[in-house]
Image (tube, rainbow, N blue to C red):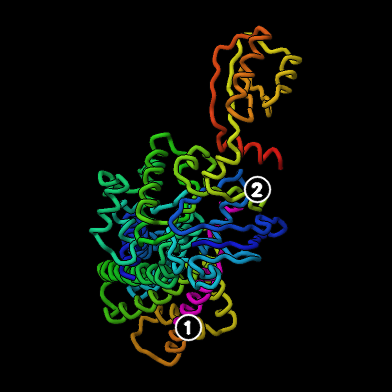
Amino acid sequence: MKSELQKEIRYALRSGRILILFASLLFLALLTPIMLKVVLPQVLGGEVNDLVMMTQRDCIRSYLGDVFEIGGIVIAFTLCGLTACELQGDTWLLPVCAGKRFGHMVGAKLLVFGTLQVILPVATLLVDYLYSSYLFGFEVGISAVLFSGILQSIYLVFFLSCLIMWGVFTRKPIPAGFLTLATAYGIQAISSLLRMQGWTPSGLLTQAMELNPTVDSSLLISLTVTVLLIVTTMRITMAKLKYMEWNERSAQ
Amino acid sequence: MITVTGLKKDFGDFQALKGLNMHVQAGEVYGFIGQNGVGKTTTMNILAGLSRPTEGECLIRGKDVTAVAHPGDLRVGYLPEEPKFYPWLTARETLLYLSEVPDNKRVEEILRWTGLVDGADRRVGGFSRGMKQRLGIGVALVRNPDLFILDEPSSALDPEGRSVVLRLIKDLKNMGKTILFSTHILDDIERICDTVGMINDGRMVFEKPLTQLQVEHAQPVLDMIPTVPIRPDVADALSKVVGVVSLTRSESSWAVRVAHPGVSLTVMSFLAEHGIAVESFAFRKARLEDLFLKEVSDK
């Protein structure tokens, strides 16, 4: 497993994936406070502006929403080739013949990029927290921000597991990205419509928006469902890889 | 080492293999020849555990290839036709990544053996096709398997690259390894193979030791370039001379297949009788290529 982890870390660093993700999330983290403090008042104008009082809490919530909506698209299309390109480009052929286990190859991707999905959003959320406190003043405690950041990161790990699974099924990066976005936005839309967000990974985002570091039964359900879904997507991915025929194009 | 019996493989309605039989002995270099699209890569994929047969039996060291849970469990050094590496890894990192247990000393040995020491710390993305092919053979050796399946290892390489790859295959043979390799460069087969198997339309046409094949089909060939064109009636008469098996014209030269070398005297006399001088009159053994073309045209 160590060699697989090393390989994924090298890929993340040398392909510039970390830089792209960090720059995109940092951009959102810095842009959101500016938009709410400077641009929005100018757009709304005098009287309306007095009615809409933006706070640091609103600013952080807005950033969390942006990460789901815009950040999700960036993550989907930055990491859509994680498994799809390996299959499309036949780069998994030699490792498979060399005895590399599917569990290790896929697990290393989930572990390395999952860790990035925790570190980068939390780091940029802290940037957003500090910058919004500079513009709006301190209102929210750091523990609440960290708690929300971690909940959102767990959701993003689920998002990543979908990318890995759809990549193996489609063998094409762009369709894998679209299918992952469809899965994430679809779950969000359906669970909102049926008022059952607490029973889906979307419940983690709802809880994150609360900026309230307390663990209740609803959060525990969302966490359990998310972890179960991550495990399920990984098992489906593994099953698909196990019964896959390799090097087909060259043979036909 | 390898026993294949009645191997069939379907891709939808297309039948790629139609009951292939094959036997590869331990320690030999087996040349697998055939035109493009006749089922060489399909056979090799199945033997490497990468694809499942529709029907038939494939045994490697007596073990059914379909019974293993993972292709890597077959312990076969496999080199696909176009090995794909991670372009952002160096050659050294690639070998270390694909090693069973990372062993710097062994990786260093392989780099030296494949002649990649100078490029060891360069990213594979910048490698030439020949360097990639050499790295591919190194990768196949990294787990020290006793069986190698190499799909067209010398194709699409320049003469120097081909020569290096053939040298590596010879080295593997000297290490006591068994090698099954496919190619359409028949000269390579004649240079390094012990046994030759020819596949056509998903079936094995013949499978014989190279030496036996050369004896059985060794009808000598006279290549000659006449100074004046040979008239059709004279060519017809020449083809009827006792001992002349066949006569083939290729632009200005003629290839006369004869039953035995002594017939060359009769041919020379015939040409002298008809006043035909020749620029060149070369006697050679029939090549595998002649046999290959004959088998293909017969089919």
Q: Is residue B6 magenta?
A: no
Tag 2 residue: B200
On screen, B147 above or below A214? Answer: above
Q: Chain of mark 1?
A: A
What x and y, as percent, mark residue B192? 44, 44
Q: What stretch of residues is rendered in magenta?
A: A227-252
Q: Which residue lies at the image location 39% right of the left edge and 63% below the top edge? A: A41
What is the total number of numbered labels drawn onto the structure image?
Answer: 2
Q: Would you identify the image quadrant in which residue B262 lies?
A: top right
Q: Amino acid at mark 2?
A: Asn
Task: Please identify the quarter of the rendering in which residue B22 is found.
Answer: bottom right
Amino acid carrying mark 1 in the image: Leu
Residue projecting furthest to the top: B275
Q: Position of residue A12 (x, y in %)?
A: 34, 60
Query: Split into 4 quadrants, where in the image is the N terminus of chain A?
Result: bottom left
How much space separates mark 2 and mark 1, taking CA atoms? 51 Å
Judging from the image, mark 2 belongs to the subunit labelled B
Q: Which residue is mark 1?
A: A228
SS assignment for the magenta stretch, majority = helix
